[in-house]
Image: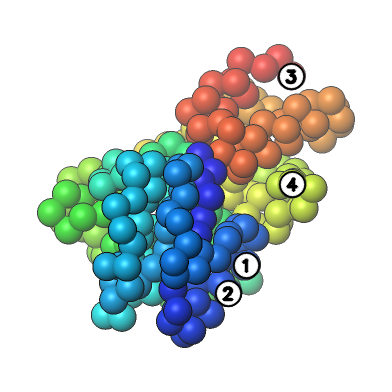
Amino acid sequence: MRNNIFIYSENLNFFYLVNRELNKLKIKFKILNFGDKIPSIPCIIITTVKELERIKSPNRKVVILSYDENDDFNQYMLKVIASYRIGYKEQYSNLIFSIDPGTKHIGLLIYLDDYYLNSHTIYNKEDLIIKIKDYVQGLQKTDDLISLKFKFGKGILPMTRNLINSIYSLFKNRANMKFYLIDESKSSKIKIYKKKRKIPKHEASALVLSFRDGVEVNILSFQNDIKYINSKKLNKQNLLAENSENSNNILTFSEIAEKVLNGELSLSESTDILKNLKY
């Protein structure tokens, strides 16, 4: 899903903020001036609540996302990005966070309803928790909790344990929340491109981890789960057998990864394809 985006606002501060965020994400948009005809094509119109009344009778193909000055702007922009990349929904079903913990950087990649939504390189635990909280609060209704899944690389277990405990404490009243430990073997050696631009190393690692199966963590038996995954033998199919010695396999894997980033394949579709490839 890649909808056209139009900004319809004379609020200079709002325009500046939206323009800055869309440019960061390299999302193209057009300016819709007051008095212009509302497009008849599927599109997203970004405006403010105060200017909403100026939009007359838009057709069913138009999604209008209005911003109130009392709203959290970061969470508002998440709704815009979700509508652009996945399609507008009154309520989304699930979020998947794939996390590659590192000593200096943390790679974070997010799926919404099985499709790639966004990725980040984060520099400390506190910012990661804030980012996750923004995504959850911004993309759900308060009376209908979205299901959450967290996939953690197990390379730095003390850090992973700390992050899992913090996230669990933040969302501990949820019934539908799962944590997984993922083997990180070779995940940092694979280069992945999106529209000819190489995505940052730690975000690429988080993407690779998202394709892999892992061991589900029970918070009450966390230490035993860690011992279990550490004792588990390497399963080449489970790790998708990314083989750096075979350039044809890397190209095939990279092509699939890029299709995921471009919204052409869902996470489920891509993992099914990768598991069926012969390496």
- Image check: 28 left or right of 188? left
Disc 3 marks which residue?
Answer: 279
Residue at image position (76%, 52%) is 198
Q: Nearer the viewer, mark 3 or mark 2?
A: 2
Q: Position of residue 44 (x, y in %)?
A: 44, 53
The residue type indicated by label 2 comes to Arg
Q: Nearer the viewer, mark 4 or mark 1?
A: 1
Q: Nearer the viewer, residue 117 or 243?
A: 117
Residue at image position (48%, 84%) is 12
The residue type indicated by label 4 comes to Lys
Question: Residues at badges 2 and 1 in contact (C-beta under 8 Å)?
Answer: yes
The residue type indicated by label 1 comes to Asn
Provide the secondary structure element on which disc 3 rests.
loop
* On screen, residue 246 above or below 35: above
Please identify the residue farthest to the bottom as the structure is shown. Answer: 13
Q: Nearer the viewer, mark 4 or mark 3?
A: 4
Q: Earlier in the sequence, mark 4 or mark 2?
A: 2
* Labelled disc at residue 23: 1
Q: Earlier in the sequence, mark 1 or mark 3?
A: 1
